[in-house]
Image (spheres, rainbow, N blue to C red):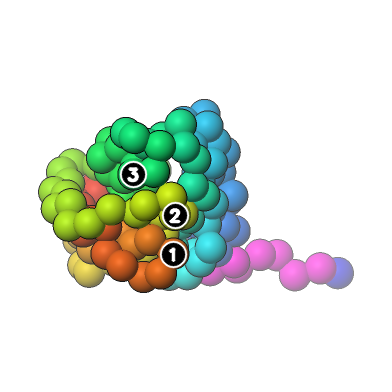
């Protein structure tokens, strides 16, 4: 006789499904992002350098940086989500401060959940180049209901 999955097992299975699915959505797949780390409330995404995503052949377009920041924040929100509370989600707001450039470098975004409310999740996201130099910082409010 096999044991039935516990509610906690089911939550973990659903969280892992999100980690598997997010990079495969059409836009993210086109960008080429991957999760390097997907742990509860702490995720890291990587965008391998692509010249066609830059302004000048070496520096990422700000919209590309914002897209990866947003997705990393969403990943952090989902990474420890209680699926009994809902599955409809969207970014409510995100503020990005660009402070540097990833010159001919992968973009690495680390997102940490700062607070979970009933529906709103607040994340803090930092984008760096592969040498750890900060490219941008964002704060995001994400909603799952």
Q: Residue at x 57, y 57 (%)?
A: 16
In the figure, is residue 7 to the left or right of 64?
A: right
Along the line of sight, the residue nearer the viewer: 122 or 4: 122
Look at mark 3 in the image and give the residue it sits on: 59
- The image quarter in which residue 32 lies: top right
Regarding residue 136, the answer to whether it shows in the image is yes
Q: Crowding near pointer 3: few (<14 within 10 Å), some, many (20+)? A: some
In the figure, is residue 51 to the left or right of 99?
A: right
**Would residue 4 be counted in the magenta stretch?**
yes
Tell me the chief SS of the magenta region.
loop
Along the line of sight, the residue nearer the viewer: 114 or 55: 55
Q: Earlier in the sequence, mark 1 or mark 3?
A: 3
Q: Residue at x 41, y 69 (%)?
A: 131
Q: Residue at x 31, y 59 (%)?
A: 127
130, above or below 93, in the image: below
Indicate the secondary structure of the residue bearing disc 2: loop
Q: Earlier in the sequence, mark 2 or mark 3?
A: 3
Q: Residue at x 49, y 64 (%)?
A: 38
Q: Please provide percent x and percent y for residue 93.
A: 15, 43
Look at mark 2 in the image and give the residue it sits on: 105
Indicate the secondary structure of the residue bearing disc 1: loop
Tell me the magenta residue range.
2-9
Indicate the secondary structure of the residue bearing disc 3: loop
In the figure, is residue 54 to the left or right of 91?
A: right
Look at mark 1 in the image and give the residue it sits on: 130
**Would residue 144 be counted in the magenta stretch?**
no
Q: Crowding near pointer 1: few (<14 within 10 Å), some, many (20+)? A: some
Q: CA distance from mark 1 to mark 3?
A: 13 Å
Along the line of sight, the residue nearer the viewer: 32 or 134: 134
């Amino acid at each position: 006789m096999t044991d039935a999955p516990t509610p906690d097992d089911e939550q973990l299975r659903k969280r892992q499904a999100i980690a598997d699915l997010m990079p495969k959505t059409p836009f993210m797949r086109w960008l080429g992002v991957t999760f390097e780390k997907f742990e509860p409330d702490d995720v890291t995404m990587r965008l391998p350098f692509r010249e066609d995503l830059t302004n000048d052949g070496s520096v990422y377009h700000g919209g590309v940086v914002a897209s990866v920041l947003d997705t990393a924040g969403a990943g952090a929100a989902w990474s420890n989500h209680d699926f009994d509370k809902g599955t409809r989600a969207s970014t409510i707001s995100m503020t990005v401060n660009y402070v540097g450039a990833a010159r001919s470098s992968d973009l690495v975004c680390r997102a940490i959940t700062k607070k979970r409310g009933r529906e709103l999740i607040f994340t803090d996201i930092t984008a760096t180049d592969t040498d750890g130099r900060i490219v941008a910082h964002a704060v995001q409010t994400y909603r799952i209901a």
